[in-house]
């Protein structure tokens, strides 16, 4: 009788352990990676456009929600962006830069957005004489259940930033 009771407890323990393993594994499935790319035609040759937007902290001059940009002075640089209302801040690290090809890439170190593994590139290319294309691309993993919030937020940032670049260069 004792071995039967022990066997039942062992089976019960194995079932419990299996259920716990399944429950834990459900929480480890990450949301699928997402990509985003927006482009805008702007007035100016690539070198002219790059001189207006290419500095790592120039983002404060063309991204409407950004009120302040503080660069740490290191190589590669890290910038801290603070929104105009002071309610949010982003810390971003430059991961690549090519001034000859008018591009830089960066990643979020910290962000209030519901994303992880965010990386982005801003690039300026020539379309025709005196006209360039600014392309802003990003990849990220949205937080589970926050896919729409992440997509909406980043789309809004990209679109408002590119529109502001276009307006700035139209002057």
Image: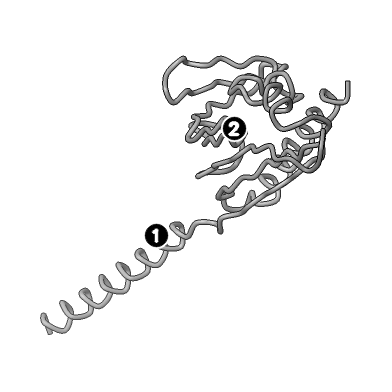
The residues bearing labels 2 and 1 have C-alpha atoms spaced at a distance of 26 Å
Q: Nearer the viewer, mark 2 or mark 1?
A: 2
Comparing 117 with 101, the one in front is 101
Q: Mark 2, residues whose alpha carbon is within 10 Å: few (<14), some, or many (≥20)?
A: few
Does residue 125 appear to the left or right of 93 in the view shown?
right
Q: Nearer the viewer, residue 155 or 162?
A: 162
> Residue 35 versus residue 18: which sits nearer the camera?
35
In the rendered view of the protein, which quadrant contains the N terminus? bottom left
Q: Which residue is mark 1?
A: 24
Q: Is residue 72 left or right of residue 168?
A: left
Q: Secondary structure at mark 2?
A: loop
Q: Quadrant of residue 160?
A: top right
Occupied quadrant, residue 68: top right
Relative placement, left or right, of 118 versus 20 is right
Q: Which mark is residue 52?
A: none
Residue displayed at 52% across by 32% down: 97
- Secondary structure beneath dot 1 equals helix
Any mark on residue 112, and which? 2
> Hey, which residue is sitting farthest front in the picture?
129
77 horizontally vs 165: left or right:
left
- The residue shown at (52%, 44%) is 116
Residue 133, position as x, y percentages in the image: 76, 40
Residue 77 spot, x, y in % from top left: 47, 23
């Amino acid at each position: 009788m004792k071995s039967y009771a022990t066997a039942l407890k062992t089976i019960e323990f194995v079932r419990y352990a299996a259920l716990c393993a399944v429950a834990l594994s459900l929480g480890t499935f990450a949301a699928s990676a997402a990509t985003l790319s927006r482009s805008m035609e702007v007035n100016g040759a690539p070198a002219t456009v790059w001189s207006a937007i290419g500095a790592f902290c120039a983002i404060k001059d063309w991204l409407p929600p950004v009120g302040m940009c503080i660069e740490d002075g290191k190589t590669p640089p890290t910038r801290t962006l603070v929104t105009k209302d002071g309610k949010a801040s982003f810390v971003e690290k430059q991961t690549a830069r090519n001034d000859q090809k008018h591009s830089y890439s960066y990643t979020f170190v910290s962000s209030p957005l519901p994303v992880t593994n965010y990386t982005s590139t801003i690039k300026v290319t020539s379309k025709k004489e005196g006209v360039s294309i600014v392309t802003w691309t990003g990849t990220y993993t949205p937080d589970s259940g926050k896919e729409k919030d992440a997509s909406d937020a980043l789309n809004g940032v990209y679109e408002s930033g590119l529109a502001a670049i276009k307006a700035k260069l139209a002057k």
